[in-house]
Image (cartoon, helix red, strand yellow):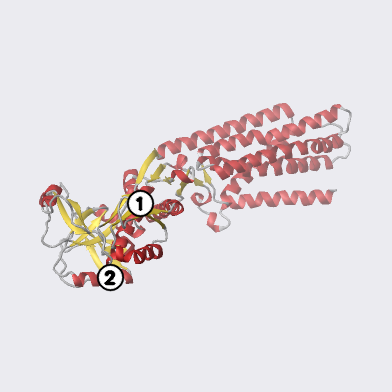
Amino acid sequence: MRKNLRWKLLFIAVVTLACIAGFAGFPPKLANMKERIHLGLDLRGGIHMILQVVTDDAVNMETDQAVERIKEELRLRQISFSEVRKRDFKHIEIREVDPQKTSETRALIDENFQYWDRSTLPEVPNSYLLTLRSSVEQQIRASSVQQAIQTIRNRVDQLGVTEPIIQEHGVASEYQILVQLPGVDDPSRVKDIIKSTALLELKIVEPGYGPFPSREAALSQFNGSVPEGKELLPSVRRLNDPSQSGEEWYLVNKVAAITGKDLRTARPTSDEFGKPIVSFNLTVDGAARFGRVTEENVGKALAIILDGKVKSAPRINGRITDSGQITGSFTLEEANDLALVLRSGALPARMIYLEERTVGASLGADSIRHGVLASLVGLAIVILFMLFYYKLSGVNAIVALILNLIILVASLAYIQATLTLPGIAGVVLLIGMAVDSNVLIFERIREELWGGKNVVSAVNTGFSKAFVTIIDTHVTTVVSVLFLFIFGTGPVKGFAVVLFWGLLANLFTSVFVSKVLFDYVLSGSPRYEKLSI
């Protein structure tokens, strides 16, 4: 028995030393306290946001692109038509197609627009109605959310925010994103960077028209309607720059020559006057296409458009291949932020802030201080109670409790968990749950002693009878905790992580460690006649 006891004591010592090694910085990656246990948003301070992705934008964009592609395909095949227009976000009308080419038109639609269901327009002869398939629509919406998450993550990573939480929120059909950024000291700037659509387009300006002082002035040149294949876009100048005040409108091609998808990189630089600008380089395919477009349009203006507004419209003096510049009276920070969002890619749709909460660093420090104080007060009260009510046996429970807390904190350090305020509440709860197991065991031992059994037999029987109950309560609690972890978010997950590891540690300390301590004390005198309990 003594040999088995030595092995058990050695095992407890190894576990304890392994936990202490974690605190001491072994392995080396745990040497920095900040890298061991990360503080959550509510303790460290930062931003909590819930954003709504306007997925209708992504579906509308798909429909708009389909309209332009249909027009292009019909013209290439020399099929006449009166109009191709978008009825709503998922329906396209193709009106009065050449009746001599009905079969060719249907084949064109079926082969090149497989995501659309074709039907006829009964009220208009030789006309078709295309309907976006529901499965494709849902796929576009879901894909836009995932793309938005990845884009936001790219932007946040470039800001250097550690341990961000960026994930889907709620049910899939709500198209919401949860963003938690701990330690952010400039919330308004981060919000602007996250929300910026950053849709970059380069379009040829229609020569001889504009810029116009207003949209009304532009429309008056075209009998009140924008010409086919063109669009009017504003250029809002900075009001704090006297040389660039007011508003101008440009008539540009509807189809972009280059978009943000063709960018290889973007960086903030300065022009010859020292003013901040953003320089960009294009991909191989983008550069080839840009070179062809600029060569064909020498002498025309090229509108550089960001989020539907013309930032500048320089004149094309020659063939341009793989690089360009975006000017617009930027401040240095604006140039940095624009380069950042261009590098990270455009958002597929607009974002709406549904919820926003900023936690100050001082509030987080107060939460830590109050949480630690509550834990220490709870620990002190529990220790005093165990010593008062169970005498020297209470020391056994206290040793097991302290080892429980050591194992818990070491486990959180090794897995590099994020500690939240509910997590601290979980620690306080575990203090009570840990001694609860010991109380159950001690009461069983008392019952056996009152029944006339000797000390050794009473201890063995007490542990044996309490074991099943302790296992049952811990297993059911662990199952509940797993559900919290799987379906919870943020602080709820933090609470679940602390409770999970604490329950496992409690099983080890209250059942195994506590029994070994009793065995060690009682092994010194097999005829122990009295137990301080």
Label 2 neighbourhood size at 10 Å, few (<14), some (14-19), many (20+)?
some
Between 365 and 100, which is closer to the camera in this rendering? 100
Q: Quadrant of residue 259?
A: bottom left
Mark 2 element type: helix
Instruction: Tell me if I can see residue 269 in this picture.
Output: no
Q: Does residue 516 appear left or right of residue 381 in this picture?
A: right
Mark 1 element type: strand
Q: Position of residue 127 (x, y in %)?
A: 32, 56
Q: Does residue 523 appear left or right of residue 93 in this picture?
A: right
Q: Quadrant of the C terminus?
A: top right
Q: Residue at x 42, y 61 (%)?
A: 114
Q: Residue at x 69, y 33 (%)?
A: 436
Instruction: Tell me if I can see residue 431 in this picture.
Output: yes
Q: Residue at x 56, y 40 (%)?
A: 495
Number of dots carrying numbers: 2
Q: Residue at x 73, y 51 (%)?
A: 11
- Give the residue type at disc 2: Arg
Seen in the picture, residue 92 relative to 357 is either above or below; the reply is: below
Q: Which residue position is annotated with label 2?
A: 289
Residue 31 is marked as none
Q: Position of residue 283 (x, y in %)?
A: 33, 69
Label 1 neighbourhood size at 10 Å, few (<14), some (14-19), many (20+)?
some
Between 215 and 70, which is closer to the camera in this rendering? 70
Residue 91 is marked as 1
Mark 1 to mark 2 CA distance (whole Å):
31 Å
Q: Does residue 288 appear left or right of residue 152 in this picture?
A: left
Q: Position of residue 463 (x, y in %)?
A: 79, 37
Q: Position of residue 481 (x, y in %)?
A: 61, 41
Between 401 and 212, which is closer to the camera in this rendering? 212
Seen in the picture, residue 33 relative to 399 is either above or below; the reply is: below
- Give the residue type at disc 1: His
Between 81 and 195, which is closer to the camera in this rendering? 81
